[in-house]
Image: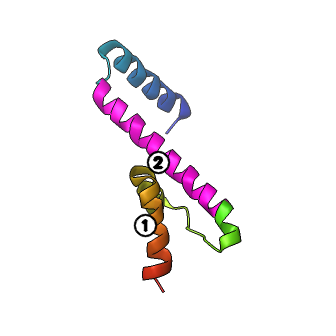
Amino acid sequence: MDPVITVSIVVGLVLILLLVGAPLKPVRWLGKGVIKVLIGALMLFLLNTIGTSFNIHIPINVITTFVSGFLGVPGLAALIIIKYAILP
């Protein structure tokens, strides 16, 4: 597809949303979810950085990021227990 057409479609959709208005509740819900996922990825990164001296490493992927982001520190602890106590 031609880039001009793609940009025109995106600009048109943005203008329609600005004129009509986007429903605020789903946008707010989506924003909170994205922030939680980013915080989960940051927590995993910090755990892997600090945990190198304790031989702790949890891979950063979609599932572990969602678990640590939405469950917080208990989710991070659960990931560590699952990794080292349940999995061989």
State the colouring used for the structure image: rainbow
**Residue type highlighted by circle 2:** Val
Residue 21 location in percent, x, y?
32, 17
x and y, in percent, of residue 76 in the image: 47, 61
Q: What residue type is labelled 1?
A: Ala
Answer whether residue 33 is magenta in the image. yes
Query: Callout 2: few (<14), some (14-19), or many (20+) C-alpha neighbours within 10 Å?
Result: many
For disc 2, the marked residue is 37
- Give how far across and how far down residue 4 sits, in percent: 53, 28
Instruction: Relative to 32, say whether 80 is above or below.
Output: below
Mark in front: 1 vs 2: 1
Q: Is the magenta stretch mostly helix, strand or loop?
A: helix
Does residue 12 lie above or below 57 as drawn? Answer: above
Look at 69% across and 68% down and name the residue there.
Answer: 52
Gap between marks 1 and 2, in whole Å?
17 Å
Region rendered in magenta: 24-49
Numbered badge on residue 87: none
Tell me which residue sits at (42%, 55%) in the image: 66
**Residue furthest right in the image:** 53
> Is disc 1 surrounded by few (<14), some (14 to 19) or many (20+) residues within 10 Å?
some
Mark 1 or mark 2: whose residue is earlier in sequence: 2
Looking at the picture, tell me which residue is in the foreground, 47 or 33.
47
**Mark 1 residue element:** helix
Q: Is residue 8 above or below residue 51?
A: above
Image coords of residue 40 (percent x, y): 50, 51
Residue under label 1: 78
The image shows residue 40, relative to residue 10, as above or below, that is below
Reply yes or no: does residue 48 show up in magenta. Answer: yes
Residue at image coords 62%, 55% = 46
